Image (cartoon, rainbow, N blue to C red):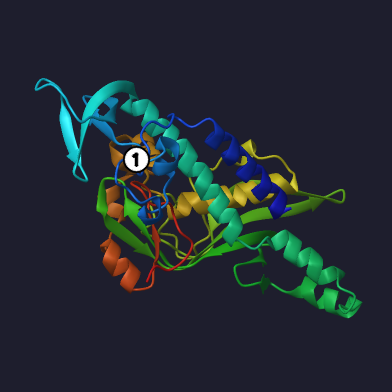
């Protein structure tokens, strides 16, 4: 099931790569750039690592030029001269396209790292060595933890969760600032009716995370707070959509301060409270977060969110 969703996302990503935002112009070798030494990034992929110059909201392609007039806008990179030659597009269009590609990369990353709880449970109870009495014992459990995922019973409702390791997420208002959060379980409600599974309600964060802006009633002692911007009605009652619903919720939690989120909250106010009153846990630099073993989540710039600790 998870593999089907992952295959679909990767196929869509490949299709987008065929229709890159820009066509290749200068050869990287001609620019004196070794591609093997360039960090992989979404922005690099969609621009094919071509040099660009941004001015007054417009994006210009920089062309290699041995000779140029004094009136030309020239830039020297790696000892080579470039001139701003072609007005490619507006910065806003490039930014929007970049964010769409980045969101797709996040979905792929989330699916690759997460264990599919539905599939794990199905495999576990269908193995020949699992006796009927073991299945009865399983049904009595309030919680079953499979490591990176699992399920739990709360108030007579079943929830499937995905566990995020402790992470530090970048602040879209200042790329040098990262806000740390403890390991967190993101869950969706699962029910059964007439022999078929369904999902309802918004995804939730199981633990209390009072410093996270995207949680309703974030100060509630018992946790289990709803995640904003995740409309339960936008997902169908199919297994594929349940996986998508869970992975989308994970992305909201690890990247709450990306550009899209900040722009959609007037005055950077979340559930009626300004960000600066919510984020009280103390910020870290990128280096500090990595040293402390946090999963470092980039929401802007070159790097994509990585589901691994950076050394």
Residue to which mark 1 is pinned: 262
- Decide: few, some or many residues near mark 1? Use Cα within 10 Å; few <14, some 14-19, many ≥20: some
Is residue 286 in sight in this rendering?
yes
User: What residue is at 57 percent from the left and 50 percent from the top?
Assistant: 108
The one nearer the camera, 284 or 81, is 81
Q: Is residue 81 left or right of residue 281?
A: left
Where residue 268 sits, quadrant-wise, is top left
Percent position (x, y) of residue 143? 67, 72
As drawn, 38 above or below 24: below
Percent position (x, y) of residue 90? 33, 23
Among the 4 quarters of the image, the one containing residue 155? bottom right
Give the number of callouts.
1
Residue 117 coordinates in the image, percent (x, y) = 69, 62
Quadrant of image for the C terminus = bottom left
Furthest residue in direction front, as rendered = 66
Q: Secondary structure at mark 1?
A: helix
User: Would you place residue 19 above or below residue 277 in this image?
Assistant: above
Whether residue 156 is visible to the viewer of this picture, yes or no, is no
Q: Is residue 152 above or below residue 300?
A: below
In this picture, is 39 found above or below 261? below
Q: Residue at x 45, y 64 (%)?
A: 208
Q: Is residue 113 left or right of residue 189?
A: left
């Amino acid at each position: 099931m998870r593999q089907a969703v992952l295959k679909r996302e990767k196929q869509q990503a490949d299709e987008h790569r065929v229709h890159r935002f820009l066509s290749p112009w200068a050869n990287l070798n001609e620019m004196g750039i070794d591609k093997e030494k360039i960090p992989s990034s979404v922005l690099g992929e969609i621009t094919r690592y071509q040099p660009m110059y941004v001015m007054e909201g417009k994006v210009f392609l920089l062309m290699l030029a041995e000779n140029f007039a004094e009136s030309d806008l020239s830039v020297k990179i790696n000892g080579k001269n470039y001139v701003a030659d072609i007005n490619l597009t507006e910065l806003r269009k490039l930014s929007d396209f970049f964010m769409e590609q980045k969101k797709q990369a996040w979905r792929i990353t989330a699916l690759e790292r997460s264990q599919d709880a539905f599939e794990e449970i199905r495999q576990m109870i269908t193995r020949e060595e699992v006796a009927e009495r073991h299945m009865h014992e399983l049904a009595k459990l309030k919680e079953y933890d499979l490591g990176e995922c699992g399920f739990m019973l709360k108030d007579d409702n079943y929830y499937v969760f995905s566990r995020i390791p402790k992470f530090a997420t970048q602040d879209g208002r200042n790329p040098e600032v990262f806000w740390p959060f403890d390991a967190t379980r993101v869950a969706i409600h699962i029910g059964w009716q007439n022999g078929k599974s369904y999902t309802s309600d918004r995804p939730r964060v199981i633990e209390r995370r009072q410093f996270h802006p995207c949680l309703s009633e974030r100060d509630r002692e018992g946790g289990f707070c709803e995640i904003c911007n995740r409309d339960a009605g936008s997902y169908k009652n199919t297994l594929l959509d349940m996986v998508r619903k869970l992975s989308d919720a994970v992305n909201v939690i690890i990247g709450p301060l990306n550009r899209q989120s900040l722009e959609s909250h007037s005055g950077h106010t979340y559930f009626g409270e300004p960000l600066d009153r919510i984020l009280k846990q103390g910020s870290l630099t990128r280096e500090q977060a990595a040293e402390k073993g946090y999963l470092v989540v980039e929401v802007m710039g070159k790097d994509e969110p990585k589901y691994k600790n950076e050394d």
